[in-house]
Image (cartoon, rainbow, N blue to C red):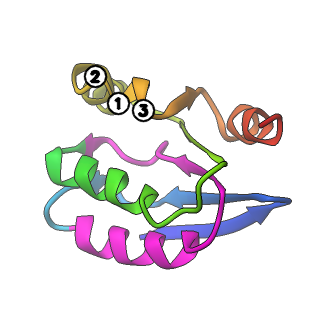
Amino acid sequence: MMQVERDDDVIVITVDAARLDAGSATAFHHGASQALKNEKKAVFDLSAVGFMDSTGVGALVGVTKTMRKGGGIAVCGLTPAVKTVFTLLRMDMMFKVKPDRTAAVALLRET
């Protein structure tokens, strides 16, 4: 479902699922929450996700609440369908959006 890596002080979670929806949101939330516990900076690479519904959005938002204050969160690799969801729900105001992992990690290193 996901790969978790550390890039210096940034945790990178690459979601391998094609869909982040009611069928996968619980597993995503549990795994990502464990990975991000007590972390300050995280990148979510969503390049493999072709579909995300409100349950997936809720899981993504919920995961960020397990993180420590004072860091940053970025998402990258948004497919056109997921980018539309982010825009409609104004998620691009909550998360920093970058085209790829390199740009997202670089942005968080500056904070």
Secondary structure type for disc 2 = helix
Residue linked to disc 2: 84
Residue at 53% over, 35% down: 77
Residue 94 visible: yes
- The amino acid pointed to by label 2 is Thr
Q: Position of residue 103 (x, y in %)?
A: 73, 31
Magenta stretch contains residue 49: yes
Tell me which amino acid carries mark 1: Met
Write down the residue under mark 3.
94
**Image check: 105 left or right of 16?**
right
Sequence-wise first label, 1 or 2? 2
Q: Nearer the viewer, residue 49 or 8?
A: 8
Q: Is residue 42 left or right of residue 83?
A: right
Question: Vertically, is 4 above or below 86?
Answer: below
Please tell me whether mark 1 sits on a helix, a strand or a loop.
helix
Q: Specify few, some or many for label 2: CA neighbours under 10 Å numbering under 14, 14-19, or 20 or more.
A: some
Mark drawn on residue 33: none
Q: Which residues are magenta?
A: 24-51
